[in-house]
Image (cartoon, rainbow, N blue to C red):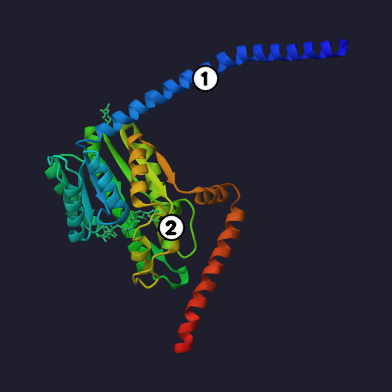
Amino acid sequence: MFMLELAVNNKMSDLKTLFSNFNIVGPISLAVAIPWIMFKMFSAVWIKKNYNELAGKVVVITGASSGLGEALAHEFYKLGAQVVLCARRRQELERVRTDLLHTYCKDTTHPPIIIPLDLSKYNDMQNHVDKILSITGRIDILVNNGGISHRGRVKDTTIDVDKNIMDVNYFGAVALTKAVLPDMLKKKSGHIVFISSIQGLVALPDRSAYSASKHALQAFGDSLRAEVASDNISVSTISPGYIKTQLSMNALTGSGQTYGEMDATTASGFTPDYAAKEIVRAVVVKRKELVLSTLLPKIAIFLRKYFPFLYFVVMERRAKRASLAELAKSKPDEKTN
Ligand SMILES: NC(=O)c1ccc[n+]([C@@H]2O[C@H](COP(=O)([O-])OP(=O)(O)OC[C@H]3O[C@@H](n4cnc5c(N)ncnc54)[C@H](OP(=O)(O)O)[C@@H]3O)[C@@H](O)[C@H]2O)c1
Ligand SMILES: *[C@@H]1O[C@H](CO)[C@@H](O)[C@H](O)[C@H]1NC(C)=O
């Protein structure tokens, strides 16, 4: 009987300490929750305001004739920006412009502008920018998105292919950025976006030219960001994983032919629409960099940095697997020859 009483008393005191804990836990959780909720509310209002500010902004997008660039044109246009669509294929740019005009019943005070250009002819970039400025009066955001990929071993890739990919992906973006910069510096406002790649942070075998060009872009962006920060100019570097676009189809082989195959990895990637939404959000909140991928590429970046030997082993195996697959693919041909 006495024991039972003791047990009940113990339970009671347990309950009491539990309640007195609640007395502390309650205020503490409120003290954390209220500022957190307020922060969330303020940032939501701030982000909304920044989205609204895109209206009327002049956004120049390279590679706007296909894939991610096309999706970015839709996103920016939808939010009221005046988009300037750049790429080589005028017809495709016209298709995108027609799509934009037909998809969104927006007032057409800012119709999309088309500027056909070849990024590899980087000496022409100043002329193109002068032309844009003569139409719009300013460039608020430059999205360096146009690019081309590579499929092939170093030993099989001609230096001309290396140069071509570097010209388009790196020097084209650099020249365009340099051409746009003076006006942004004068106006003390602007935003330059580089669409790099996961492969701007970790290199894969059979992509040497592409990886090198994207690594270069990454470094250029980091230098530029520091230089222009005091001039109220933002620089965002976006490193996407696979996106479902024509990138692998349009990739160059070692001899400079078009690869013409849809890689399974590319086909299973993010949709261009999703990637574009995330990128516009990053621009709106002025993120300095964004790794836009699933977990695996992020692990690869981590390994490359902190456990490089593991990354080297994984990549060696990948290269070996790729050459075995290549061999298996060429076998049936040999029989017919
Ligand atoms: N898809 C992915 O998995 C992935 C992943 C990471 C990063 N990215 C990057 O995303 C960007 C867009 O590629 P995407 O995936 O959308 O591929 P895409 O569908 O092949 O589009 C590439 C765009 O670049 C343009 N372009 C190519 N060479 C050009 C040149 N010499 N001058 C001007 N424009 C040129 C193309 O237009 P024209 O042919 O009309 O010139 C096209 O609009 C690239 O920088 C790519 O590296 C893609
Ligand atoms: C900085 O640039 C933003 C646009 O990117 C602009 O809204 C803002 O007024 C600029 N600030 C100054 C101090 O010029």
Residue at figure coordinates x 65%, y 13% from the top left: 19
- 182 and 29: which one is in front? 29
**Given the current orientation, which residue lies at the most extreme front position?**
1
Q: Which residue is mark 2?
A: 268
Is residue 192 visible in the rendered image? The answer is yes
- 148 and 111: which one is in front? 111
Residue 24 as seen in the image, left or right of residue 60: right
> Mark 1 CB in 8 Å range of ligand 2?
no
Q: Residue 319 appears at what percent x and percent y?
A: 53, 66
Q: Residue 157 appears at what percent x and percent y?
A: 41, 70
- The image quadrant that residue 314 belongs to is bottom right
Q: Residue 169 appears at what percent x and percent y?
A: 34, 56
Q: Is residue 256 above or below residue 226?
A: below
- First along the sequence among labels 2 and 1: 1
- Mark 1: amino acid: Val
Q: Is the Cβ of the residue at disc 2 closer than 8 Å to that at disc 1?
A: no
Q: Which residue is mark 1?
A: 32
The quadrant in which the N terminus is found is top right
Residue at figure coordinates x 47%, y 86% from the top left: 334
The CA distance from mark 2 to mark 1 is 41 Å
- The image quadrant that residue 263 belongs to is bottom left
- 282 and 227: which one is in front? 282
Residue at figure coordinates x 37%, y 73% from the top left: 255
Kind of element beneath mark 1: helix
Q: Is residue 320 above or below residue 147?
A: below
Kind of element beneath mark 2: loop
